[in-house]
Structure formats: C-alpha cells, structure tokens
Image (spheres, rainbow, N blue to C red):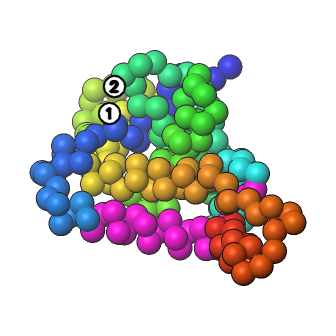
Amino acid sequence: MMPSVIAPRCTRLAPGERGGPIDERGLAELRERARERVRAVLAAVPLPRPWSMNAWVDRLEAWRGREIDLVPVAHRPGQPSGAWQARPGYDLIAYAGQTSALHQDHIIAHELAHLLCAHTGTCLMSEREAAELAPDLAPRALSHLLTRVTSGADEYEAELIAVLLMSAATSEPPAVRPGASGRAADQARRLAALLR
C-alpha cells in the first residue's frame, strides 16, 4: 500500500510566482547554472546504460555517501507529484506512483535536482502556529503542517535540471555500423564515447 501523504516539497510554481518576477537575465543565469550543475554531476556520476533510475540513484548514493529512499505514493490531480525531505541519515523522495515509468523518473529527477542544489524552501507557518492549529498532533506529524515551499526560481532550476538529466538519460548515442571504417567512422566512435 502506498502512503497517501508526505509533506509536499514541490508546488510546481511558475518562475517568479513567489518572490517576485524573474527577469530575462535571471532566467539566463539560472539556465547556465543548471547546465553547469548537470555537467558536473554527470561527470562525477555517469548515467547507466541501459538507463535505470534505480541504478543511477544507487550511484548517487555511493557518490554522496548518503542513502536516498524512493517511495511511490498515491497521487490525486492538483496535488504535488513529488516531494523531497532530508531526514536524519538519509533523504526521502516521494513520487506519484500511479503514472508512467518515464513520468515517475522525471518526477524523481526533479526532486533529485532540489537535493543536489540544496534548495531549502520557505516554511509556510511557524512551529508555534502549527502547534496552535493542531495541539493534539504528535510532534512527528507536525512536519506535515510545516510544509516547505520552494521559490519560483528554485522550481524553475529543478525542472530544467530534470529535463536536462532525463534528456541525457533517455537519448542513446548515435550508433556506428560495426563494419564502418575510415576517418568518419573513427570520429563517430570518439563522439559516441564522449556522449556515454
């Protein structure tokens, strides 16, 4: 059975929706920062071929020295489709379990982007406000009321990183015919090796 509630991290805000608009220069800087982050992560943690999100998460865990638990959850339209929580000793990523495998991978990639960027978000209410709202709630359950919402810039960056990661993960390098020879075939093989 899938858990139905994990405090949502991603609200899928459009850039600038919270914290003011992002101008073109800010968007360009975010795009370049996202591209650089993806290049650096993929240099350190190569994508498995054939592609497998679970295998790549295993590699990320080894690289970071910290476990990442992936948990499918029930999802209803209009709710966040993913959430990331840094827990004591491990990271938890919840994702919509009732969608296609490709969509699940994209949701996980988006949450991994928040993790890799160390996005912290903003609390919607204080611990005192949450305790006043639900005084009988166990302290552990308060985390659901202390939902953190990331800024539009963080959401845009995480989504761009997810798109770049999934594009790299799901595109295969061009194949070279086994019998190909000559300068063009050598160049194609070198290019294919660079893309792996």
- Image check: 184 left or right of 122? right
Kindly indicate whether the residue at mark 2 contacts the one at mark 1 (C-beta within 8 angstroms): yes
Q: Give the x, y percent position of residue 52.
A: 72, 48
Q: Nearer the viewer, residue 148 or 164?
A: 164
Q: Quadrant of residue 93?
A: top right
Whether residue 146 appears in magenta in the rendering, the answer is no
Whether residue 77 sits left or right of residue 131 in the image: it is right
Q: Which residues are magenta?
A: 29-49
In the image, residue 96 sits, relative to residue 12, either above or below, namely above
Q: Nearer the viewer, residue 104 or 88?
A: 104
x, y (%) of residue 149? 31, 43
Q: Which disc is residue 131 wearing?
A: 1
Q: Residue at x 86, y 63 (%)?
A: 178
Q: Is residue 94 left or right of residue 13?
A: right
User: Residue 103 shows which numbered tag?
Assistant: none
- Main secondary structure along the magenta-highlighted residues: helix
Q: Amino acid at mark 1?
A: Ala
Q: Which residue is mark 2?
A: 134
Q: Secondary structure at mark 1?
A: helix
- Left or right of 22 on screen, residue 61: right
Residue type indicated by callout 2? Ala
Instruction: Residue at the far bottom: name it.
Output: 183
Q: Residues within 10 Å of mark 1 (few under 14, many from 20)?
A: some
Measured along the vertical axis of the image, is residue 169 above or below residue 134? below
| Cα distance between the residues tagged 1 and 2 | 5 Å
Residue reaching furthest to the right:
179
The quadrant in which the N terminus is found is: top right
